[in-house]
Amino acid sequence: TEAVELGDTGYPVGTAYAEALATFAGKRWGWDDLAVERTAIVPDVMLGVVEMLKLVTGPGDPVIVNPPVYPPFHAFVSHMDRRVVEAPLGADLRIDLGVLEEEFRRAVAGSRRAAYLLCSPHNPTGTVHTAEELAAVAALAERYGVRVVADEIHAPVVTGPGARFVPYLSVPGAERGLALMSASKGWNLAGLKAALALAGPGAAADLARMPEEVGHGPSHVGVLAHTAALRDGTAWLDAVLAGIEENRRLLTRLLAEHLPGVVHRPGEATYLAWLDCRTLGLGDDPADVFLRRGRVALSSGIPFGTGGAGHLRLNLATSAEVITEAVRRMAAALD
């Protein structure tokens, strides 16, 4: 509001966004090593992912992902002429380190370059990777020469009791890693484009090679808004997180009562719920059935890759009334 009143609607400049994130990371996650000098403003997280992957891979190189995962991981990687390689999550919806190592080994065969696009926390499952898991990932990446690019857009949205987000760049062995962060998911600022690319000490030279014009894409007003959110919006965020956790518990109760055939493993992060509907006999795309029969719009699991068929994603960032009505309609659609 102040920017518009002043007519301050020009280009972004300075390091206030990075400084606000560094302060937030120290207070929120106990991460005191976010180096402002190893950051760069990018238009948004996914465009930042593309630019980071361009720095460490070339056309045709493999990029490993952990499906089921955010569909743009497949779309953006394929569009930039890289090859998506899947290392599916385990049955417990966590990173399967054995599968990941095997795909790392295959990816670098013949001295090829390869990258691992890590979703942390994981969308759609809400999994919060532990420090031990991330350190194991870093060790594998160093062993095989795979570069890690971590999408940490949901980092502020951790709701599970006792759950703690661990920045990838904070774990031992992650010095050559790259990460993307933003206030867009925590504070619903996706329409105000701005994100930060972060580099570990061993990746500073890579980040320095990012073309200058990439920094022209973020919104100046977006940068101001994201900075204000991180600096002044923590009380608001805490209230939102409490509401999301209440909705997660509500959904669990409603499903048990009205849709007991749906398997829901409540996540510890994001504002999303990943629902396994395979026992309902609705085929590979239950979201389509619930839309046609119940007029409930849910995300189909199919675009999330391997492990997505028979599943759907539900958005918890709404009112208790909407969630209650959605489950009621979903149950009625099965009658």
Image (tube, helix red, strand yellow):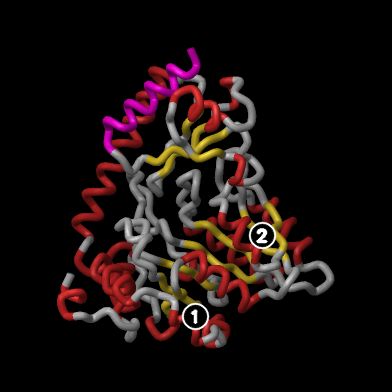
Residue at 15% of width from left, 75% of height from top?
5
Q: Is residue 143 left or right of residue 41?
A: right
Q: Position of residue 83 (x, y in %)?
A: 72, 62
Q: Amino acid at mark 2?
A: Ile
Q: Nearer the viewer, residue 217 or 227?
A: 217
Above or below — where is 23 with respect to 153? below
Q: Which residue is mark 1?
A: 214
329 within the magenta span: yes
Q: Which residue is mark 2?
A: 64
Q: Is residue 40 above or below residue 158?
A: below
Residues rendered magenta in the picture? 319-335
Q: Amino acid at mark 1?
A: Val
Q: Main secondary structure of the magenta part?
A: helix
Residue found 49% across the figure and 80% down from its top? 214
Q: Nearer the viewer, mark 2 or mark 1?
A: 1
The picture quadrant where one finds residue 100 is bottom right
Q: Is residue 32 left or right of residue 199?
A: left
| Quadrant placement of the N terminus | bottom left
Q: Position of residue 162 (x, y in %)?
A: 34, 47
Please, is residue 30 above or below residue 160 in the view? below
Neighbourhood count class around disc 2 (C-alpha, 10 Å): few under 14, some 14–19, many 20 upward: many
Disc 1 element: helix
| Image quadrant assignment for residue 27 | bottom left
